[in-house]
Image (tube, grey):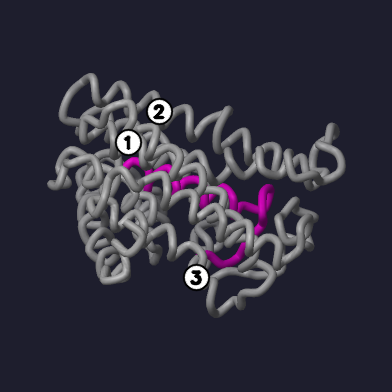
Amino acid sequence: MANASLDLDLAAELAEVRTRIDTELAAILDAHRPEVPARLLDAMRYSLLGSGKRLRPALVLWAAEACGRLDSKAALPGAAAVEMIHAYSLIHDDLPAMDNDDLRRGQPTTHRKFDEATAILAGDGLLTLAFGVLARRCESSALAAASCAELATAAGITGMVGGQADDLAAEGRFDAPLGPPNAQTMQSIHERKTGAMIRVSLHLGGLAAGANTKQLAALDAYGANVGLAFQIADDLLDVEGTENETGKRVGKDAGLGKMTYPALLGVETSRQMAAQLIERAVAAIQPFGTAAGKLEALARYVLDRKH
């Protein structure tokens, strides 16, 4: 399957996913408009439907396709839920108490556009709404329960939230910091902070398609490698990218004392490591054949992305 993605227009495929997912997300929010304070809902909508690539929903849909579920109906709830969790995490990451960012995707961050309290509540609203979407919109109660459990683990204290806590500790933000930077600790942080949500996106797609154990294992191996490569690429962008390209402040990781791959391993070694991870990811999905062409294309895009 090495050349499965060469003729695939990834930008067009991602645009199609974005249209499909944004339509779904807008409908979900609009259904709540009569009962939700207008300012809160506007902040949720601003954060959720702003510019973005919708990579995690794409992973949900394309994992389902790789496992033989070609229509998107079963995978849409999972795709919507992971984007809600992702949007909530960005709102909270940008807050003054966390990364204190003014820009996100070239636009004012939610707490700058509205206010800090509204931003916190918008994040809370998206987090909880994600699980309601899975509970109410999945095709079966069994799928809903399994999807909620997977997403709670990935987004929670042993996943993204725990990784974020250790990331802050690595900056010396707590009374008990993690200590000197090292590759093992850094990988553990990023596997949870970034990688967990990428892996669960693939799991949700596989579950929606009724994937077997081997298929889920292949998707997980792909996700683990892509997730780490994605974080390395993100670290490199903070070093080498421009604000115009990335849509956010660059060079901030060094200023915050963050534990990053370029800082610990150097730029060139980090780039080589990311390339190796992508090759492992592509190898993991070989058993799916051309059905996983979109997943391969997305993996290779991770190395070349500018934002």
**Disc 1 target residue:** 204
Percent of width and height locating residue 100: 66, 57
Q: Is residue 99 left or right of residue 37?
A: right
Frontmost residue, 54 versus 195: 195
* Residue drawn at x 44%, y 40% as measured from the top left: 199
- Looking at the picture, which amino acid does disc 2 mark? Glu
At 66% from the left edge and 38% from the top edge, which residue is drawn? 188
Q: Quadrant of the N terminus?
A: bottom left
Q: Residue at x 49, y 35 (%)?
A: 155
Percent x, y of residue 226? 49, 50
Are the two marked residues, 2 and 1, in contact with CB atoms closer than 8 angstroms? yes
What label sits on residue 150 in the rendered view? 2
Range drawn in magenta: 80-104
Along the viewing direction, whichever of 62 and 166 lies nearer the viewer: 62
- Name the residue type under label 3: Asp
Residue 162, given in percent of the width and then of the height, sits at 62, 33
* Residue 117 seen anywhere in this rendered image of the structure: no
Q: Earlier in the sequence, mark 2 or mark 1?
A: 2
Mark 3 or 2: the one toward you:
3
Alpha carbon of mark 1 to alpha carbon of mark 3: how far?
A: 26 Å
Q: x and y percent of residue 66 in the render?
A: 25, 45
- Residue under numbered circle 3: 304
Q: Amino acid at mark 1?
A: Leu
